[in-house]
Amino acid sequence: MNIQKILVPISPEQTVTERFHQIFQFANKKKVSVTLLSVIEQITPNCVAQYTQQASWEILDQIKNEQQKKLESDVNALSAQYKDCAFNYELVSGIPFVEIIKKASEGKFNLIAIDAGRGYKSRAAQFGSTTRHLMRKSPTPLWTVVSDYQAKINRVLAAVDVAAPTDDGLELNKKIISCAAAFAAANEAELYVFHAWRLFGEGYFRSWGRLSELEIAEYALKERDARNEKLTELTRPVEEAKITLHQVLSEGEPEEILPAFINQNGVDLLVMGTVCRTGIAGFLIGNKAENLLDAVRCSVITLKPEHFDSPVLG
């Protein structure tokens, strides 16, 4: 995965905390360009009329001026700290997730990196609305850093579906592994390639097919072996890289067993696909993906297939 430009959204009320430095450390190692982006939400006359006689455009200008000074200060400080990065900033107004997606597309950014941690949330992975919109609608890969982050990424996990029935699904598998391998290599981290599987029709075999438990177990073993072969084939390109690689084939539902594996094995970064309305069966789709994301405590990179059509850009 060739990462040359990273877009880092920072809301007006946010400060550049230590969580952002996981992003900047990676950018510095890769010697890439980083753009800080702040989106000021529009203020309507009706919204401010009940509080002040000042015109809404005057208030908006004041907010923009203050935010511009803050961004300039952040860029100067970061440039001094991370000398192999080229930092700049942009300030726009509008709906945050819409402007972020548009800017990432127009500027041909390879990655959006956002801090989703909020102090008022009971769990770090309970993402805000802007982050969820980006996960659902951004064709640009999204890296979400949460408050339980590790400053050093030691373990990266790529979640794939080796049984994806479409070309888009197979290409997304490769994209996920390529991205995970790039982050593992940059951080000298271990890479886990994880696939969750179930024997298709097992319940029917047991209740209607009247197969014995031994016969079902034999079918499951054959299915597992076939999946393992596909997983080995999928990870073959990574074996050539200088990365410690682990293949993990686990039986069960992804949204149940994947968070448990991540939390038990100290995974710092999860790379996965979130696919909506693309017809790729087997990937984590819609609510299942979001349930999984709410259950993990690590940073997450979410990817879309190459032919994903964002409703924001359509």
Image (tube, helix red, strand yellow):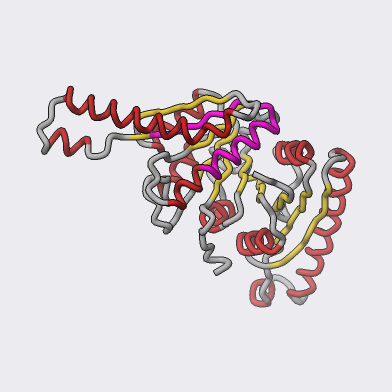
Instruction: Residue at 38% x, 41% y: name it.
Output: 163
Q: Nearer the viewer, residue 128 or 169?
A: 169
Quarter of the picture containing the N terminus is top right
**What's the magenta bit mostly, secondary-structure-wise?**
helix
Residue 296 at x, y = what percent? 51, 35
Question: Against 246, is 32 above or below?
Answer: below
Quarter of the picture containing the C terminus is bottom right
Instruction: Residue at 28% x, 34% y: name it.
Output: 199
For residue 185, what is the image quadrant? top right
Residue 45 at x, y = what percent? 68, 77
Question: Against 107, is 2 above or below?
Answer: above
Residue 200 at x, y = what percent? 26, 39
Instruction: Residue at 20% x, 36% y: name it.
Output: 203
Q: Is residue 129 left or right of 64 when viewed as pictured?
A: left
Q: Nearer the viewer, residue 176 or 267?
A: 176
Please check the rendered image and state whether residue 176 is part of the magenta-colored stretch, yes or no: yes
Please check the rendered image and state whether residue 268 is part of the magenta-colored stretch, yes or no: no
Q: Is residue 259 left or right of 154 when viewed as pictured?
A: left
Q: Nearer the viewer, residue 215 or 167?
A: 167
Question: Against 125, is 132 above or below?
Answer: below
Residue 168 at x, y = what percent? 46, 52
For residue 178, what is the image quadrant? top right
Q: Nearer the viewer, residue 71 or 303?
A: 303
Instruction: Residue at 75% x, 46% y: name it.
Output: 15
For residue 227, what is the image quadrant? top left
Q: How many marks?
A: 0
Q: Is residue 138 left or right of 247 when viewed as pictured?
A: right
Q: Where does the magenta region start and end?
A: 174-196
